[in-house]
Amino acid sequence: MADTISEYEDKLPPKVIGEIRNNLPKGVSETKLRKIMEAVYEEYQNAKVQPGESVGLISAESIGEPGTQMSIDYGEKVIIKNQNKIKIIRIGEFVDKIIGKKINYMNNGNTEICDLTNAELFVPALSQNEKVEWKKVTAISRHKSPENLLRINTRSGRQITATPYHSFVIRKNNKITTVAGSSLKIGNRIPAARKIVNLTNNEFLKLEEYLPKTQYIYESELRKAINKEENFALPIKSYEQINNYAQGNNKFQLTQNCVYMRQNHSSGQIPEALELDYLFGFFVGAYLAEGTHTQHYVGITNVSEEYLHQITKFAKKYNINYKIKYEAGEYGKSTTLLLYSTLIADLVNKTCGKGAYNKHIPEFAHSAKTQFVSGLLGAYFDGDGNISVTRRVIRASSCSRQLIDGVAMLLSQFGIFAAKSAGNKNQYLLSISYRYAAQFKEKIRLVVPRKRIALEKLARIPGFNTSYDLIDMIEGYGDTLSKLGKKLDIPGRLLNKFTKKQKIGRQALKKYVGIFESASKEKNISVNAELKILKTMLNSDVVWDEITKLEFVKPTSEYVYDFSVEDLETFTTFDGIITHNTLNTFHFAGVAEMNVTLGLPRIIEILDGRKELENPMMEIYLKKPYATGKRIEELRQLALQIKETKLHDIATEFSINITDLTIEIKLNKEKMKEIDVTIGKAADAVSKQLKGYTIKDNKDSIILKSRSKDDNFNEAYKTKEKVKSVTIKGVKGISQVLPVKREDEFVIITAGSNLADVLQLEEVDAYRTTTNNIFEIEQVLGIEAARQAIVNEIFKVIESQGLNVDVRHIMLVADTMCVSGTLKGITRYGVVSEKSSVLARASFETPIKHIINAALVGEVDNLDSVVENVMINQPVPIGTGLPSLTVKSPEKKGGEK
């Protein structure tokens, strides 16, 4: 039986598996157990919330908010991967560029969206098992910025600026869940990436990406020109002349394609593609920590012979001339290694920056293979870093914030989390807890002897027997620890403390996982499901970073920006903060503006039996192949066909010619092309819906003239206003469409409802398509369907708010509303108006009116029901109040009774 349950461990949450194991009756057969597991899995799939789906209180807080409130600031840097390269760029710059190219672009005036479903664009995202994985970006969007944005600062020195209602993720009851930024408080914890796996591991850096051919000779291009006997820009006709041009009379044998300066300067034997190995990484790290450069050389200053030896090995590999220069500096003897290569000097200038305040990690480093990154970080910490055994910390400092940010991001490739802070004199500090010293020693090699020895000492300090970790705390695990303690009969004093505070350090958790595993083996008690939950917490790729400051700031741009990402809809900023995106749509303009009536207002709306809903909507299920989303463009076109387009949506101007009383409507050809409408189709639609007029279509306009001889300016004006609302295309009443993915299929959510017309579409699955307009359901499908819809809609609202109401109460209300055969609300004009009891009618609303009217006609109340008997304070005719005692009176003399 254990094997049967184990088959579902990857399909069901650990908590569900644990509950099944704990509550499974003894003696269950294998066949029955399999049926139970299949039923649980089916229910779980049905109950699963898809990314972007509106749920409960989060829904009430965020869905109704304008789309401008669900994005981050222009200046927030993001990490994106495209064509096996990782790029760090401001989200506003990136999105503006794509929107400027109009790639699968849509715009409704409030939201601009580009559908990137078919693009191979990925970002680091958080999965439900707390792993940071590369997930596909399905769309980008921008909206007008609100007046103020919310800036969040965390204990580890990270920061993000977003709109107040942008969604963030928190950990609660062993699940990743979303919360609006406006509801965050100081002390809450949001995820920051601790580990981001580099899937690119590029082995070479192509110099032509950074060094233009206008300044450099690329031998491969020159070979092609010579072989084809083409005229080349330079008077060079042979390989011998290439050598002479590059190095004068110092001839050498060419072993690979190389790059040379167009000016007559020696550049060494630099290949067109530099190997991204340890030596190259060490050279880059050394430059970032200790380097300077001029037009013709790069200088690295460090007193360690071991340190400079790595640089000389790099120079020798590429035949670069170098020289060691000794000087007396301000703080003693100074040693500088000079590499004479104009090409290398130009490369570091363009990729790493110049000057202490402007240096940064080169972008190609984030895509480089592990050896390069290890060399870069080793050289940087050997140069600008220091290791304190007494303070138990690895530190580095720089005048450049972007350099510190980049180093922290590279450390995450090795699962090392660094805290950042601002120091004195415009210094930015980076510190790594001794708890990562062993990982640092294993993954990042230091060559300076005194630092290497200090790191070895730091790595030997045991993690869980030392000080309290303020940063790497895990929260939101419910009563998992205390339950495990009870199950394994472990004293609960400490465990209860952790349960009460709902936070535990990673090292403390590691300690208790070991205790639980030992106790489980010793007592032969299986706690695999619970341990799996704890190990997910322990091995998570994120640090739950505590919020230390919340403040409102002004936006840096007129727009705010967002990504839509598959699965959990999260993405990671360059600062490491993982944030949640709420635009899980098929990326139609205006979808974020779609409102949903929730909570008490929706309950009132249903029970009142209102025909005019505040926010009518439909869920349109589709037949194959539209439902699968495999034919993306067809799904898009279908959604646009459903959306109602009125004449004013495609018109730029409505004008009246006073002399002949004609109405001219000028049309926007670009908008017409977007929705596939011609002027002829528009004119036909107007003629069908507007009788009594002659309609002509010109190249870019439609002209209307009344056939009536009595037409006047007032009538023409009324017609002009009336024609604006003529439906040109789509289903009447459907103002917006929003395709979203539910499980393995796409469903179209609409703003507006027209069940009768939608069910006529052959692409629509009529058996599952529904609306929140109960009256439409009654008219189209009948009173029984309306009754079930009332039950479904009320139960949906109550359940989303976390309330527990027996469905039979809801069914009773639905029966009362539908018992007459027509849908009637529980109002004085609906169900209440049909009550036979005067007092029952009076108890609801307008009592004086009901009593006076009953008195005028001499109406009698037999007090047959509950309400009227309660009102006059006598037993109600139900239960024990139903029987009555009847006695026969004795007869009096004379026959009288």
Image (spheres, rainbow, N blue to C red):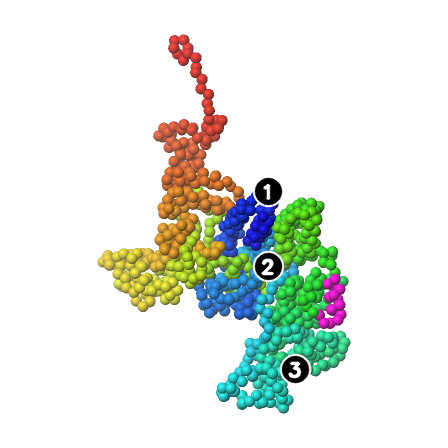
Q: Residue at x 62, y 55 (%)?
A: 536
The quarter of the image holding the C terminus is top left
Q: Is residue 57 magenta?
A: no
Discs 1, 2 touching: Cβ within 8 Å: no
In the rendered structure, which amino acid carries the disc numbered 1? Lys
* Quadrant hosting residue 672: bottom left
Q: Residue at x 73, y 59 (%)?
A: 462
Along the line of sight, the residue nearer the viewer: 805 or 206: 206
Q: Which mark is residue 131?
A: 2
Q: Is residue 332 above or below residue 717?
A: below
In the rendered structure, which amino acid carries the disc numbered 3? Ile
Residue under label 3: 320
Name of the residue lying farthest toward the left: 709
Q: Residue at x 47, y 67 (%)?
A: 99
Q: Is residue 826 above or below residue 266?
A: above
* Quadrant hosting residue 292: bottom right
Discs 1, 3 touching: Cβ within 8 Å: no
Mark 3 residue element? loop
Along the line of sight, the residue nearer the viewer: 879 or 150: 879
The picture places residue 645, in percent across and down from the top left corner, at: 37, 59
The picture places residue 784, in percent across and down from the top left corner, at: 39, 42
The local crowd at label 3, few if under 14, some if 14 to 19, many if 20 or more residues have their Cα within 10 Å, is some
Distance of label 3 from label 2 (alpha carbons): 44 Å
Q: Earlier in the sequence, mark 1 or mark 3?
A: 1
Residue under label 1: 26
The picture places residue 735, in percent across and down from the top left corner, at: 40, 56
The nearer-to-camera label among 1 and 3 is 1
In the rendered structure, which amino acid carries the disc numbered 2? Lys
Q: Earlier in the sequence, mark 1 or mark 2?
A: 1
